[in-house]
Amino acid sequence: MDGITLLTFFVLSVFIGFEVVSKVSTTLHTPLMSGANAIHGVILVGAILVTGRTTSTLGLVMGVLAVVLATVNMVGGFVVTDRMLEMFKGRQGGRR
């Protein structure tokens, strides 16, 4: 595929993703975040595997960037999910 086709897929996926996520009710955000975190784990493993098999310098740089971004995204998702779940816990003895 050429670059214009890939760019078109990327732009369309951004628009579709935004529309899908913006229509989710607030009560479903935490379960969906947990599922998304699991998917990000699979993406991280895939990025590591692809980076390990690359032979070009550009591929290595892009692969390491993909691994770093996937790691930050996954860890950040777990932190946000944990904080959201803390909000749902009841108060015990006046403390959280």
Image: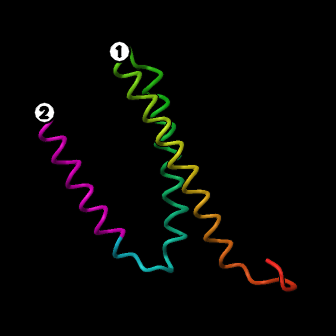
88 displayed left or right of 46: right
What's drawn in magenta, residue-wise?
1-21
93 displayed left or right of 53: right
Question: What's under tag 1, amino acid-wise?
Answer: Ser
Q: Any magenta on residue 53?
A: no
**For the point 39% across and 75% down, which residue is it?**
24
Question: Secondary structure of the magenta portion, mostly?
Answer: helix
Question: What's under tag 2, amino acid-wise?
Answer: Asp
Coordinates of residue 59 in the picture (x, y in percent): 36, 22
Is disc 1 surrounded by few (<14), some (14 to 19) or many (20+) residues within 10 Å?
A: few
Q: Judge whether 34 appears above or below 48 on screen.
A: below
Q: Any magenta on residue 16?
A: yes
**For the point 24% across and 61% down, which residue is it?**
15
Residue tagged by mark 2?
2
Residue tagged by mark 1?
56
17 displayed left or right of 31: left
Colour pattern: rainbow
**For the point 48% across and 35% down, which residue is it?**
67
Coordinates of residue 32 in the picture (x, y in percent): 49, 67
